[in-house]
Image (tube, rainbow, N blue to C red):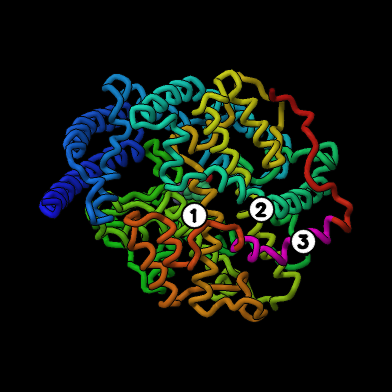
Amino acid sequence: ELEALEHEGREYILQLDKAAGLRKNRANLAEWNYTANITKENEEKWIQLRLEISKQDKLAWEETKMYKWQGFQDNSLKRMFKKYSELGVAALPDDKYKQLMRSVSGMEANYATSKICSFKNETKCDLALEPDITEIFAKSLDPEELKHTWVEWHKAAGAKARSNFTQYVQLYNEAAKLNDYKDVADWWQADYEVPNFEEQLAKLWDDVKPLYQQLHAYVRKRLRDKYGDHVVSAKGPIPAHLLGNMWAQTWNNIESFTRPYPDKKELDITQAMKDQKYTPLKMFQMSDEFFRSLNLTAMPEKFWKNSIIEKPTDREIVCHASAWDFYDGEDFRIKMCTRVAGEQLRTVHHEMGHVQYYLQYRHQPFVFREGANPGFHEAVGDTIALSVSSPKHLRSIGLINGDAEDEQTEINQLYKMGIDKIVFLPFAYTLDLFRYGVFRGSTPPEDYNCHFWRLREALQGVEPPVNRTEEDFDAAAKYHVSANVEYARYYVSFIIQFQFHRALCNIAGEYVPEDVTRKLVDCDIYRSVAAGNALANMLKMGSSKPWPDAMEALTGQRAMRADGLLEYFRPLYDWLLAENQRTGEHIGWQPSNIQYC
Ligand SMILES: C=C(C[SeH])C(=O)N1CCC[C@H]1C(=O)O
Ligand SMILES: [Zn+2]
């Protein structure tokens, strides 16, 4: 009898899954049409379609509830039923669902179309985040220009989003409760399927904090050397506008004047890419070739036809890089306003990693066509980029000229990787610790900006360039806050990508513990079919099993741990400890003199 019920349940869920796949295809096409051409008409079409689809989702959900699936034998079948037992935002009544959709697309459109006036020419007021403002932050060494650009962007993209954001929090929390969660923080953390996710994040930060503090102290000293102690104090937080990035989330753009051994050549490959006439298409073709060298899947023909890899000039689009699965097994796309620069080559690999994951799990039921957890999806491309960023690989593709690997160039290399990977962690941690507080109500709207900056100062040791008030809303000046994209996934990714990298380097024979000729920092898995097959086996699983199973399949570990990252950066940590002692630099930071609460 139970056999028959389970058999009937399987028939049902597989047919439901196919129908759900078609709905995802239609929804993603409508979202693509809106974000690739931001108009009121396309926004309305996307909202109407999601409303129509929510009705079909609700019918399917009512029917699924009738099955006694908890008692089934087949774990995979139970996992499918469990996932389809959660309705999602469609649980909201129509009017509230529409309001929620409008508040998010309103924030996202504001972010994507915000323009500011130039510091150097105040009548020129058409500067967009990409490429104009990003280029200013990458190149300008004028603290006043950087301050102006920072303040204007945060006014246009942050403050303007405050009312939409407040409404979004209210409605999204209602949807969370309708799905049996306490609040959205609870809902977001459920995707990681561990009971103590937030404690795990805190433990990882405890493990990495000493390394971050040493790097922070060293960079603050080098910035003080550059700009003077009236701009950068000896013991306070670092002013956020001097770190080469609007959100101070990666400091790679200040490598040229802060690297440990300045007489050794610069490792940033942007100039070499420009000299060699790199184009966005060439960057994508190189990434595709790297994946193929691992015996992974080539980008399908539709990818090259349908993707947008350069900023269009005839319309407004969401420029923030994104990868898309249209759930039909052949239509996969990237939308990116690509610039020819070193950090963009990493982003290209990041996005191509998403598409490779889509390709590897495209035979799974639709409901399992996800990352093992959201952090896995963000880690694939970055893991490949760790090999691409190695001096050995960059030399092999002619982006850096030969230089004997000595102690000093290795420290410079680890420093370059550290100001990208280590400094990102407290930024990512801040962004969702802040939003957990917002969704839980411990951060009410009147405290949004004060709590945001209190966390940024406590964890990142950065301060705003000027005083802030609750007229501002600086969190929304970051894409993911304006676009309702959860961010702990990146914090997880920047930890587990080093576990993945170490495992793949081991399999490729590129890394042997304690063997100085096989160091992790020099590892390049390029052309290792063995490494590619191991990665593919993990990617093929999608979310069909709990993520510890996927982690174990590739690394032999069942938990996310900082040991991979700490092993990778060990030589840099030792160097920073000695260097900061030599210069007597204060480690850590005292409270800022800037007012923001
Ligand atoms: C490139 C993407 C698209 Se999923 C991105 O948002 N990333 C990649 C690294 C961190 C985060 C960011 O830019 O804030
Ligand atoms: Zn991503």
Say what amino acid the circle numbered 3 marks.
Pro
Q: Magenta stretch: give its range.
A: 564-580
**Depth order, front residue of 340/223:** 223
Secondary structure type for disc 3: loop
Circle 3 residue? 260
Q: Position of residue 511 (x, y in %)?
A: 57, 76
**In which quadrant of the rendered view does residue 169 lie?**
top left
Magenta stretch: helix, strand or loop mostly: helix
Q: Is residue 209 above or below residue 316?
A: below
Q: Can you see residue 112?
A: no
Q: Position of residue 274 (x, y in %)?
A: 55, 60
In the image, taking residue 424 as reference, residue 292 lies left or right, namely left
Which residue is disc 2 drawn over? 208
Q: Is the shortest distance between ligand 1 and the CB of mark 2 under 8 Å?
A: no
Q: Which residue is mark 1?
A: 347
Q: Is residue 577 magenta?
A: yes
Q: Residue at x 27, y 61 (%)?
A: 301
Residue type of the residue flagged with mark 2 = Val
**Which badge, 1 or 2, comes first in the chain's sequence?**
2
Q: Residues within 10 Å of mark 1 (few under 14, many from 20)?
A: some
Amino acid type, mark 1:
Thr
